[in-house]
Image (cartoon, rainbow, N blue to C red):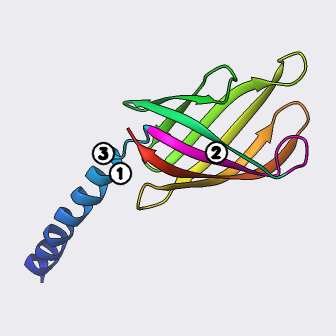
Amino acid sequence: MQAGRIVRRLSILPTALLVSTTLAAADLSGVWELRWEPDFGGNVDAYECTLRQDARRLTVTCRDDPAFTGDVDGRKVTLSFKTGRDGTETATLTGELDERGTTITGTWHLSEQKREGKFVARRKSAE
């Protein structure tokens, strides 16, 4: 009986390694469409952003706005930047990358105003 359990566990191991390798290998670098549902002003908005990934660190450039940074941990993606009239409001986007590596779905949160909304980012092209 004990040998059967060991064989079953060993048969699962290659699959688990393949999944963890696939998630670790995901590179988000490229052009993405970021869709706000709604944006900070209450409107639905979408525009292109360029993501550059170096290991777990992301650098994001959207339109003519200053670049901001983020982090990738498996399929979890977190982005953060300063916003607002005086630049003291922190916006944090937290989402999950789908299995194909083409869509990030999540929520945004404004720290000071305690407001939230949803966002979806879809890969348009890879680098």
Q: Position of residue 40 (x, y in %)?
A: 85, 40
Q: How many marks?
A: 3
What is the CA distance from the residue labelled 1 to the residue labelled 2?
Answer: 17 Å
Mark 1 vs 3: CB contact within 8 A: yes
Mark 3 vs 2: CB contact within 8 A: no
Under circle 2, the secondary element is strand
Q: Earlier in the sequence, mark 3 or mark 2?
A: 3
Residue on which the image places disc 2:
94
**Span highlighted in magenta in the image:** 30-43
Give me the residue at 12% from left, 84% from top: 1
Residue 126 position by quadrant: top left
Mark 1: which amino acid? Leu
Q: Determine which of the numbered discs, if any, sits on residue 23 in the image.
A: 1
Q: Position of residue 28 (x, y in %)?
A: 43, 42
Mark 2: which amino acid? Thr
Under circle 1, the secondary element is helix
Give me the residue at 46% from left, 41% from top: 73
Q: Residue furthest left?
A: 3
| Whether residue 126 is situated above or below residue 97 in the rendered picture | above
